[in-house]
Image (cartoon, rainbow, N blue to C red):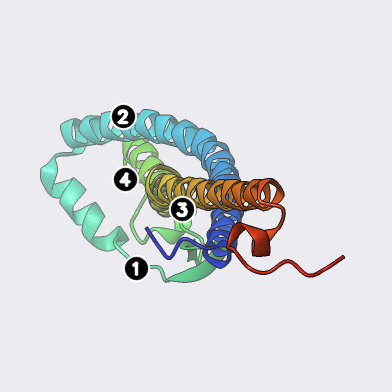
Amino acid sequence: MSNPNRTTLLQLREKIRTVGESLAILKARRQALVAELLQTARPFLRSRRELRARYAEALTELAATRGLEGEAAVAAMVAVTRREFPVELVERNILGVRYREIRATAPVRRGVEERNYDFYRSTGHAEEAIDHFEQLAAAMLPLAAFEHKVKRLGEEIVRLSRKTRVLEERLQPRLQQESRQIAMYIAEREREEYYRLKRFKQREAQGGGAGQGRGWPVPPR
């Protein structure tokens, strides 16, 4: 226990008040981040379902293309249609949480005439497969941004929860316990001083004064 006096007690009460205010701020921030996480997760989950369905369609069309045109024709088509498209990373900040968004600086989906092969000799399944995979690539960019945002929000919520738990379960009870002990010590000491003063006054009243009680000469009246 710290030095049990009123100054220490006032300092402890100020610390308890500061911890309480900090807890309120942390809980409000955590609640806002949880709300943002839920709002972000809904379209994220919906996009994941849509991507799975589109990926299944793309695989179906690719299997049909391989069956109709053969592996060599599909490999040649892949070689001539392969390309790179630039992307950029954009820094974002939400409630103090930093995350990155990925943006394509060029269109991902192309027209049939932009795919550098003779589409008059290809089947409709090949066109559908290529279009589905390009749609997947275009949809995966914002999905990657969603995943990074959700991950950063989750990490920050966990960090705030740990900090709140430390303040609420360790620091705050320890300060309150120490404050109660010092308050009890000061109250007990004040009661002792009160009874000591009361007994002194009683003895003084019974002995006709402090001087008479100790055998001192009484001045003439």
- Closer to the camera: disc 3 or disc 1? 3
Question: If you read the primary sequence from the N terminus, does the residue marked by circle 3 or circle 1 appear first?
Answer: 1
Q: Secondary structure at mark 3?
A: helix
Of 113 and 84, nearer the camera is 84
Residue type at numbered disc 2: Ala
Quarter of the image holding residue 126? Answer: top left
Residue type at numbered disc 1: Glu
Q: Which mark is on residue 149?
A: 3
The answer to whether residue 59 is left or right of residue 52 is: left
Q: Above or below — where is 97 with respect to 31?
A: below
For label 4, count other residues whose C-alpha is less than 10 Å away and answer few (under 14), some (14-19) or many (20+): few
**Residue 108, can we see it?**
yes
Residue at numbered disc 4: 121
Residue at numbered disc 1: 84
The answer to whether residue 22 is left or right of residue 177 is: right
**Number of dots carrying numbers:** 4
Q: Secondary structure at mark 2?
A: helix
Of 36 and 81, nearer the camera is 36
- Closer to the camera: disc 1 or disc 4? 1
In space, the residues marked 2 and 1 are separated at their CA atoms by 24 Å
